[in-house]
Image (cartoon, rainbow, N blue to C red):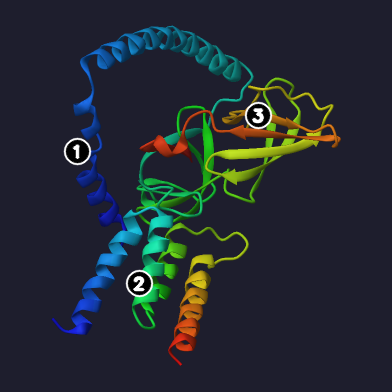
Amino acid sequence: MSKNVLRAISFFAVLFMVLVLPWWLSFFLLLAIVIYVDFYLEVLFFGFIVDILYGVKVGFVYPALSLSLSLLLLVYFVKTQIRT
Amino acid sequence: MARPVWSVTEVAVKPFSFIKNYFRTQGSVVEENLYLKEQLSSFQNKAIDYEILSKENDDLKNQLGRTGNTTKIVARILSKPPVSPYDTFVVDAGEIEGVLPLSKVYVSENILVGEVKSVTPHTSLVQLFSTGGSEQEVVSLRTGSSFSIFGLGGGNFKIEVPKDVDILWGDSFVYPGLSSGVIGNVYYIDTNAQSSFKVVYLRTPINVFGSKYVFIEKPI
């Protein structure tokens, strides 16, 4: 199975988990994937989905999306520093 | 998009939720059964009282020309905390079923938990009054005084008031208005000798997250 097909299948699996698992479990799952997979951009989509489905427009509108972006950049930065 | 996933998950998970009951002893089941029978009998008596008082309340409102001009829509909860991180529910009734933004949401006939924030054709997003950082005006059922309560998440609230303010353990706070629903009951009062204020903690009378259905107010 090619890497892209595997990534596509894992996308739907993770999407399902984000929709049915408690948010803190989804958070740790996504954190593990972001650390394991190189530049896992899909995490931004999952953050966006959480904001769209459950977020209310009070105060800051996209906290989960912002957290995902920060996490992605932080992990990317740390990983590149470790490898060089 | 997420609606079919939530519906299928509930159907798939439900049969497994009672598995632990197969491993209980007969003695504990009998004991629980007796306890529940006693409880049931007590609640049946209270239900009769409630019906009489509710009817009397409606009659009085009718005599004063303030009849209720709303009805309630039953909606199934599709997704709730802890799946949702923001103290919000997604329910399976939307614009087509007559739900409007800012409609009030009840978990039982008189327990008010939140309001509708956004509506799609077949689903609605309900925000609980207890959402962290949100503020809500309430009235004490015993004294009639008004307060602002602040959401702490998970059906919990707090009020910070001067020590002399008359609030007692068990006091109920209701939504201001004629058809007022109970928002929370006092379960703890934190007083400190160093401070001239006391912090009063409230929570919703029943576990909001244990409910499968909610009732959404709809104007007639």
Residue to which mark 3 is pinned: B188
Q: Is residue B175 visible?
A: no
Residue at x 34% of width, y 79% of height: A37
Position of residue A10 relative to residue B147, above or below, is below
Distance Cα–Cα, label 1 vs label 3:
37 Å
Disc 1, SS: helix
Residues at circles 1 and 3 in contact by the CB criterion of under 8 Å: no
Residue to which mark 1 is pinned: B15
- Image position, residue B65 (x, y; %): 61, 22
**Same chain shared by disc 3 and disc 2:** no
Q: Nearer the viewer, mark 3 or mark 2?
A: 2
Disc 3, SS: strand
Disc 2, SS: helix
Q: Write down the chain letter for disc 2.
A: A
Left or right, B74 with reference to B192? left
Left or right, B153 with reference to A17? right
Residue to which mark 2 is pinned: A33
Q: Residue furthest bottom?
A: A84
How packed mark 2 is, by other alpha carbons closer than 10 Å (few <14, some 14-19, many 20 or more), is: some
- Image position, residue A62 (x, y; %): 53, 68
Distance Cα–Cα, label 1 vs label 2:
31 Å
Residue type marked 2: Ile
Residue at x 70% of width, y 20% of height: B142
Residue type marked 3: Tyr
Residue type marked 1: Pro
Q: Is residue B168 visible?
A: yes
Q: Nearer the viewer, mark 1 or mark 2?
A: 2
